[in-house]
Amino acid sequence: MLLFTPGPTPVPQNVRNAMSDETMHHRTPEFEAIFEKTRTHLFKLFKTDEVVMLSSSGTGAMEAAVINLCHNTLLSINSGKFGERFGKIALAHGLKNVEIKNEWDTPASVEDVVAALQANADIDAIAIQISESAGGLRHSVEEIAAAAKEINPKIMIIADGITAVGVEPIDVTNIDALLAGSQKALMLPPGLSLLGLSNAAIEKIGAGKGYYLNLASEVKKQRQNTTAYTAATTLTIGLLEVLETIEAEGGIDALYERTAIRAEGVKAALEALGLHVYPTHPAKSMTTIDDENASEIRKLLKEEYGVNVAGGQDHLKGKIFRINQMGLIHNYEMAWVVNAVELALDKLGRRTYDGTANKIFNEISFKIGK
Ligand SMILES: *Cc1c(COP(=O)(O)O)cnc(C)c1O
């Protein structure tokens, strides 16, 4: 079965092998050496002043960022389930929350954010997804962050890059916390989350908030190549292997370029079949199609062609399907996926199969790809 959901993503064989060794003790020079190497790679990936790893799924990094960086009112951007989660986290911790809510195909506008900040001087942090995985859209985080800092230079920008870090270059000039998670673009099993932090963020964190998710304790320990609590040793070993593999395959910029071409190829191939891309501003992490036969297409993909793609949640259940584009994906697998979608449409009597999707994907990925 080809796993083509936008998280979890498949774990490459060499990474699985690297994680199959005996469990290491975390308070040893051997593990600290691995931790240090991993950190060095992470600084290159995040391009932020500091980086910390947490043993938690991605939501742990979201909660850590909110409680440590928001001390009064959080402005959260809800264009989907993950954006909605930021608001729920704030309320769960007794913080105030202002939300900008849009349909799941619509990114937040700079104007709406500026208006919210002007209307509420208590807002001291903004939380936003770079790629909102619920509908597969890309928010203009960099522009929003720049506009927000112009109004209030002290405001903290929390950018959830769980389906963006490792997918496309991110300008972190105005970002204070950049979040990532192991099971999406980083091609690992779930259980590790990561935060890139700005110096301004570290200053605001001060002595930190919370206990397990106290970022001050983690920053202090991780600068010494250890962790405040037991490290996710096996996942850290896997992460180092992933980051070394990306390096060996031409480096992160080459991966960004290949991902962008893959995204363009999938979108063009599916649109040529008459399918409709759901978000008005699609992220490069995935292609989301809204379609009245979304459930039937997913079922055929899985049962007839061995391809597992994701559906929708909440009000989009049965209305969309989402195809992953993150990670070290072989073009021949991606070509198989778009071809399988075309075969499914033929089976549904929607369109006679003629190989269009495969042709278009290959033209784009091999003409301008590597
Ligand atoms: C997957 C994901 C998360 C975190 O989810 P977990 O299940 O806690 O790992 C957060 N934000 C986005 C955009 C995601 O795609």
Image (cartoon, rainbow, N blue to C red):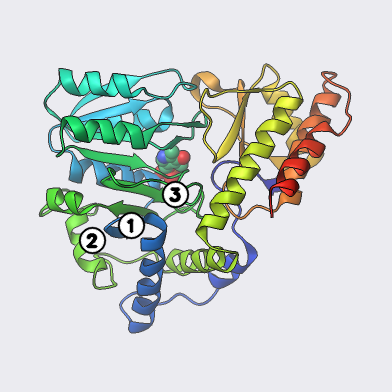
| 244, above or below 95, in the image | below
- 3 left or right, relative to 189: right
Query: Where does residue 80 sit, x and y in percent of width and height?
Result: 43, 26
Mark 3 secondary-structure assignment: loop
- Residue sitting at 74 percent across and 37 percent down? 338
- 206 left or right, relative to 214: left
Q: Which residue is mark 3?
A: 165
What is the CA distance from the residue labelled 2 to the residue labelled 3?
21 Å
Q: Which residue is mark 2?
A: 218
Tag 2: amino acid = Glu
What is the CA distance from the residue labelled 1 to the residue labelled 3?
16 Å
Question: Closer to the N terminus: mark 2 or mark 1?
Answer: 1
Question: In the rendered image, which quarter is residue 361 located in?
Answer: top right
| 124, above or below 47, in the image | above
Question: Closer to the N terminus: mark 2 or mark 3?
Answer: 3
Question: Closer to the N terminus: mark 1 or mark 3?
Answer: 1
Which mark is drawn over residue 54? 1
